[in-house]
Amino acid sequence: MTERAFETARIDDLERPDGWSPLRLHFDVQAFGVNAWTGHKVDARVIPEHDEKPSGHEEFYLVTSGHASFEVEGEAIDAPSGTIVFVRDPAAMRGAVAREPGTTIVSVGGKPGEEFRPGSWEANRDVFALLDSGKNAEAKQLLLEALERYDDHSVLLYNLACAEAQLGEADAALEHLRAALRERPSLAEGAREDEDLRPIRHDPRFAEIVGAG
């Protein structure tokens, strides 16, 4: 028996409590990034303000229901259902809010001329919720698995350090914090005040790693 040539799903059936419908993960899409985001209240943030400098991605947004308001590099864009917003420049700041309840935006992204590689933010969305609820052992396990699946490790390593610090695994936490900051030095600023790292903040190695004191 051969595998079917297609799959189907409804966005609202895949939606998580935070409004994210992980289309790429659900279908295991390998050629490009694709996700859907839904805001259920007026003025709800549908697309967080961000740029794509780390990934180099072009991004294509399609409002599939409701009515959104985009802002790209300070310019407001009215976007009722059916509107397409294409952001070619990865450095451009962009974001969108809902102007009607039930506003859904599908986003598609990729870097021109390069093979698509999934971003570790997919795993980190779940990690943040686990850390916030004190489920540090579960967060650690998810992060260890994610390190095998994704190429961009900096934030995964940082969050792993946070989980390990909360679990009392100071040596491992400091090692992974050092590795995270080696890949992305800008994480040091937040690390100095991160409550998840408080258990290792007294260690002299912490100050050496983050460049404080």
Image (cartoon, rainbow, N blue to C red):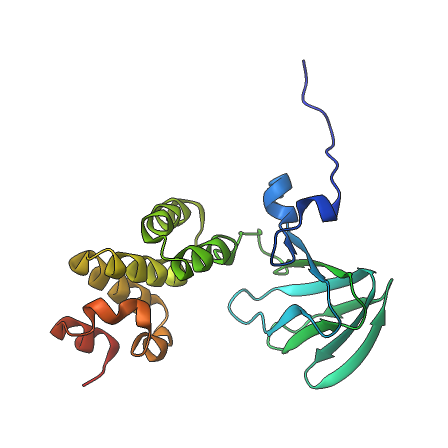
| Camera-nearest residue between 206 and 197 | 197
Residue appearing at x 46%, y 58% in the figure: 129
Q: Tell me: 144 left or right of 5.
A: left
Is 166 located above or below residue 142 in the figure? below
Q: What is the residue that sits farthest to the left in this orientation?
A: 204
Residue appearing at x 31%, y 57% in the figure: 163
Report which quarter residue 76 is drawn in: bottom right
Locate residue 68, reporting x and y percent.
79, 70
Q: Could you tell me which quadrant the N terminus lies in? A: top right
Residue appearing at x 66%, y 54% in the figure: 35
Residue appearing at x 79%, y 73% in the figure: 99
| Number of numbered discs on residues | 0
Report which quarter residue 197 is drawn in: bottom left
Locate residue 120, reporting x and y percent.
47, 55
Is 125 located above or below residue 185 in the figure? above
Q: What is the residue that sits farthest to the top in this orientation?
A: 1
Is 183 located above or below residue 21 in the figure? below
Locate residue 20, reporting x and y percent.
63, 56
Locate residue 43, reporting x and y percent.
72, 75
Q: Could you tell me which quadrant the C terminus lies in? A: bottom left
